[in-house]
Image (spheres, helix red, strand yellow):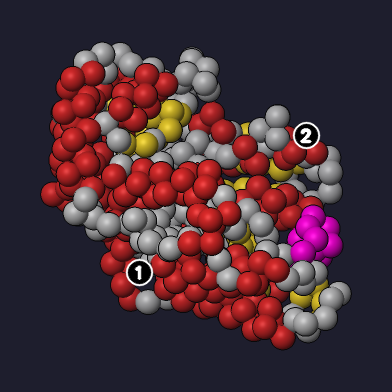
Amino acid sequence: MFPYTELKQQDQQVYDAIRAEERRQLYELELIASENHVSLPVLETMASVFTNKYSEGYIGKRYYAGQENVDTIEGLAIDRAKALFGAEHANVQALSGSPANAAVYFAIAQPGDTILGMSLAHGGHLSHGHPVNFSGKLYNFVQYGVDPETHLIDMDEVRRLAHEHKPKVIVAGFSAYSRDLDWAKFKEIADEVGAITFADIAHIAGLIAGKQLENPTPLFDVVSTTTHKTLRGPRGALILCKEPFAKEIDKAVFPGMQGGPHDHINAAKAVAFKEALQPEFQDYAKQVIVNAQTLAQSLVDMGHVIITGGTDNHLMLLDTIKSKGLSGQEAEHALEQIGVSCNKNMVPFDERSPFDPSGVRLGTPAITTRGFKEAEIKKLAQWIDGALSNADNPTELENIKAQVREVCEQFPVAGTV
Ligand code: DSN
């Protein structure tokens, strides 16, 4: 879509890779639950000369000169983020999800403090206390998970662990859990033990901004999110908090964790937040969930095993071992052969390894942005079933791939050829 005339002259290899990636995104389908397709205005803004600027500090208090335009875009991003989530304070400088969470812990806890978070193996996130991550190394994380029978978060277990370990912070949030969180219950438990409440809404921020899922911001002390998943902005993050935490959060981001913010990205965050404030964004968010529910139900109807039997949000976990006797790795590969990207994923109580687990995670934000509705989703379910039933049949995989490509051509992706 962009001409890239200068780039083509100067660096053919990078130019070719960009064009190839444009074709891949256009002719294939993204079911990776954390991905999306940003709008042209967001793409344009990321390519702006704001990338040249350094602007350590905050609005009106910077360490370098020439900040009048940076202050404008950062102010717009902050005001729009506060309006979108009803927040008392917003920091838009965090570079991405894990750095944002690092800044949050840095602001509200001391190394060695006890924090309660959801186990990655049950759908949490690396930065919620996994032992190989900074969070698990620096803090004394206690992990909660899901019930072995229902695969739903066991709130009685959360309460029991909170009373037993008296955490400084309770983290609510996930990267692979398909059901609503009971924000009020988390808050109630935190209040019982005097813990700070921290919601990581990275996966569902767009569904909350689009008014389809309940917003924890009015209830919780601190909220973090990435800006590029369902929220459909540039890669980056956002931290929201109650006013009493504002100073510590800002100090933790800069100078605590980061140097200069990425002003071109922050400008694009402002653009994306404006998009998310429009009524059409609510239609998109609603359709993301309808599409996910349609996909889950269609797969269940064809005999596949979806963890918890369905979804309340944009994602689902498909147990490919139980469905078709394929490992997550094999299923991911089969789907890639038909032009559908997803990621292999552990299912709760998985006995296999993270590199070759028992399932895949599927999500609908990117295909919804392209315009997929229920009719296309039903076709998609058949393609997925076809690919997983014919993983060893290259001719059939090629045949399905041609059908995927034909439909993709009718649903353009902003910024592609
Ligand atoms: N990598 C993101 C995801 O796919 O959920 C989380 O950081």
Magenta segment, prevailing SS (helix, strand or loop) = helix
- Dot 1 falls on a residue whose secondary structure is helix
- Check residue 258 for magenta coloring: yes
Question: Which of the 4 quarters of the picture holds residue 28?
Answer: top left
Instruction: Quadrant for the N terminus, please.
Output: bottom left
Question: Which of the 4 quarters of the picture holds residue 393?
Answer: top left
Q: Position of residue 405 (x, y in %)?
A: 22, 41
Q: Residue at x 31, y 24 (%)?
A: 334
Q: Pointer 1 and pointer 2: residues touching (CB < 8 Å)? A: no
| Circle 1 or circle 2, nearest the eye | 1
Position of residue 388 in the picture relative to residue 255 (left or right): left
Q: Which residue is mark 2?
A: 137
Q: Residue at x 63, y 34 (%)?
A: 143
Q: Residue at x 65, y 72 (%)?
A: 50
- Give the alpha-carbon distance from disc 1 to disc 2, as whole Å: 39 Å
- Residue 30 seen anywhere in this rendered image of the structure: no
Q: Which residue is mark 1?
A: 281
Q: How many marks?
A: 2
- Residue 146 seen anywhere in this rendered image of the structure: yes
Q: Residue at x 52, y 47 (%)?
A: 12
Position of residue 74 in the picture relative to residue 56 (left or right): left
- Check residue 148 for magenta coloring: no
Q: Identify the magenta region.
A: 249-260
Q: Residues within 10 Å of mark 2 (few under 14, many from 20)?
A: some
